[in-house]
Amino acid sequence: MSSGNRESVDRQTSVEFRMLGPVAFERCLALQERLAFEASSRGEGRIVVLFCEHPDLITVGRLGSRGHIQLTDQQLRREHLEVRWLSRGGGCVLHAPGQLAVYPIAPLDELGWTVGEYMRRLQQGIVDAFGELNVHGETYPGRFGVWGRSGQLACVGVAVRNWTTLHGAFINVNPAMRRYAFVDTLPPDRATAGEKTTMGCLLAERQTAVRMASVRSTLVKTLATAFDCERYHLHTGHPWLTVSTRTPRERERVE
């Protein structure tokens, strides 16, 4: 894509950041799917980024398998851990309060980006945010994610539907780390020499308290820069979360 075309696209591009707080995974997925449908049919170069935290569960992407979960079905029930299989990239990810989920809904065709370019921009925005927070983040060639001294700090796994992105990145800010041993996010048999296979968090990297709000506000700036967007807007919540994204179980309770 020529630089002239890129400047034309960038002038029309803005980012809308949505601070959702704690959200059930299914409700957030339904919101992403509706936003992706709207983005692919709207024909604008606007990116919507959702920030939220999920209750405890395990999601499995296209590179994951049941063998990467180190618990029996009985143990999963005892730990109250649901397993959800997804069409995103990446492997198994444990979600918990204290982990920040970052979901950019980006119309790649309108932006003129390839999937690889989008992934690099997303990862760079995370690395730059860590730097602003005095955390040194490392990346490995051929892998998407960010690592630190304590282990993997951010997992990246996306899906693309009609040239619009879903899912995104999961950043361990200050979660309870005990349960992360239940899942092989980077299985040892797939790791190369020098790659850390354990999970870490920003709290362990800094060894001082780190506020979720600080991480979010830093990511707003670094992601806007990584996406080449000078204009961005901040919002709390999303009106579509109130009714339209209720899960079938939630709708049954209301009805």
Image: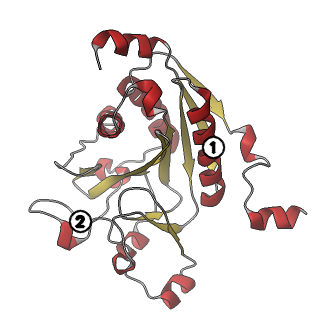
For label 1, the SS is strand
Is 180 located above or below residue 240 in the figure? below
Q: Which residue is drawn at 19% across and 50% down?
A: 142
Tell me the amino acid under the disc marked 2. Answer: Thr
For the rendered model, the colour scheme is secondary structure
The quadrant the N terminus occupies is top left
Q: Which residue is drawn at 29% across and 56% down?
A: 152
Q: Specify the label residue 20 is tagged with.
A: 1
Q: Which residue is drawn at 76% across and 64% down?
A: 248
Is 145 located above or below residue 72 in the figure? above
- Say left or right for 81 vs 146: right
- Label 1 crowding class (10 Å Cα cut-off): few <14, some 14-19, many 20+? some
Tell me the amino acid under the disc marked 1. Answer: Leu
Where residue 63 appears, x then y in whole percent?
33, 65
For label 2, the SS is loop
- Say left or right for 150 vs 72: left
The quadrant the C terminus occupies is bottom right
Which residue is labeled 2 in the image? 197
- Say left or right for 35 vs 1: right
